[in-house]
Image: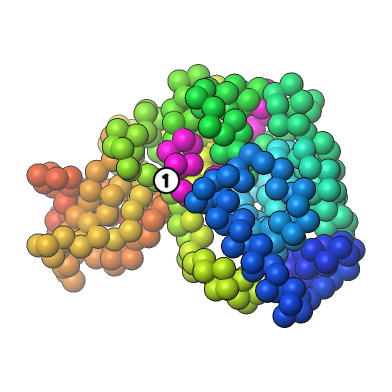
Amino acid sequence: DLAAWLPWLTGSAQGRAHQKGSLSREELLAVTRAVRSLSKGFTRERDLAGTRYFNDVTFLKAYLLYYWPISYIQARLVYARFLPPEFLKRAVVLDLGSGPGPAALAALDAGADRVTAADRNREAVKIAGKLAAARGKRLTPVSWNGTPAGLLAGRYDLVVLSHVVNELYPGHPARIERRATLLRKVSGLLSARGRLVLIEPALLSTTRELLALRDRLLEQGFRVCAPCFRQGPCPCLTEPTATCHAQFSWEAPAVLKRIAHGARLGGEHLRFSFLVLRPGHTAGSAAERKGAADEKAPVPYRVVSEKMLSKSGRRRYFLCGETGRFTLSAKPDPEAPWTRVFSSLERYDAVRLTNPEQRAHGLGLTRKSELLRVDATGE
């Protein structure tokens, strides 16, 4: 689906929203320079966070040709792996702070029936509407001023805020509480089965603020559906530099590779933070109901690190679940039944674990242990 969007994105960046386009060498160099400036403003000084950077035509072009495809793929990954199966089929979706609509159009491609894209920048949201129309899709572009009072009326099965929350009230001492207030208001727009999806950059600062927001929302009755299996306070926040973000390998389109190389950005992994939330107390998933009925059912854990190697030769991962965050380690053992699963684990895989041994630092695997990779939702 992303490959089908790229020519239309290029046409939009060239001011021809209803036509496909291709980049000349000079245009590619100009976009690369603008992407480098955007990256610096998003990740280093953070001086662009919360500003109206879409008002700058050069930045808008760069966003369409580089950040739009990345945001689109991030949203598709979350929708596909961390929402219930077929959740978006015929769903009604609201994309708040949509910009030119990557998360909105990702929802349409995932099967949503009606999607509204809302943003304070009229030109950006107008582009989202034109992109949808160019490929025969239905999207409603509307204006939203970024405040709780400006929210639209309606009922939605999914409300998504992609790379938006970190740009709300930047630098304000009460920004976490203000963001929580907005999201409580947003949750009133959700249908009975509704989900709230937040996608954020994987920077240490933005990720930890998302985790702090998570804890505040859980205190106020929200339930986190993904990626956390734990409903208590995030254990990362007890350590000053700990973080938790998703990472997926991908084969970026050739034009993105060229831009990333020219802008000196890594492009082999998609790194981002996200939450899938439900307001209020719910009956839980099928797996949660089964676990409540059978206390012996192994609980799921999320892999929250890359593979690490200790001095003793043991391989380790950080896992996180209802019992907290801990290391799981093992020495290579070709005869162990868990060897293939353990050696191939990647960040944000979900696993179930039985019969581990207690070690001085975390848990270890023995030949009596069982380790199963399960669906990303834990079921």
Query: Does the stretch in magenta take in 199?
Result: yes
Residue 46: % across, % down: 54, 46
Look at the image and tell me whether residue 99 can be seen.
Answer: yes
Up the image or down, 94 lies above or below 78; here it is: above
Q: Is residue 156 left or right of residue 330?
A: right
Camera-side residue: 200 or 24?
Answer: 24
User: Which residue corresponds to the image point at 83% horizontal and 43% vertical from the top-left?
Assistant: 122
List the single residue furthest toward the bottom.
25
Q: Is residue 182 left or right of residue 307?
A: right
User: Which residue corresponds to the image point at 42% horizontal and 45% vertical from the top-left?
Assistant: 204
Look at the image and tell me whether residue 111 can be seen.
Answer: no
Residue 64: % across, % down: 72, 60
Up the image or down, 68 lies above or below 285; here it is: below
Residue 373: % across, % down: 37, 56
User: Which residue corresponds to the image point at 71% horizontal and 56% vertical from the top-left?
Assistant: 59
Q: Which residues are magenta?
A: 186-210
Going by the numbered disc 1, the residue's amino acid type is Leu
Up the image or down, 82 lies above or below 179; here it is: below
Question: Which structural element holds mark 1?
Answer: helix
Image quadrant assignment for residue 68: bottom right
Q: How is the image coloured?
A: rainbow
Which residue in the structure is indicated by mark 1? 204
Quadrant holding the N terminus: bottom right
Image quadrant assignment for residue 368: bottom left
Up the image or down, 269 lies above or below 360; here it is: below
Query: Does the stretch in magenta take in 330?
Result: no
Camera-side residue: 225 or 197?
Answer: 197
Q: Residues within 10 Å of mark 1 (few under 14, many from 20)?
A: some
Residue 311: % across, % down: 12, 62
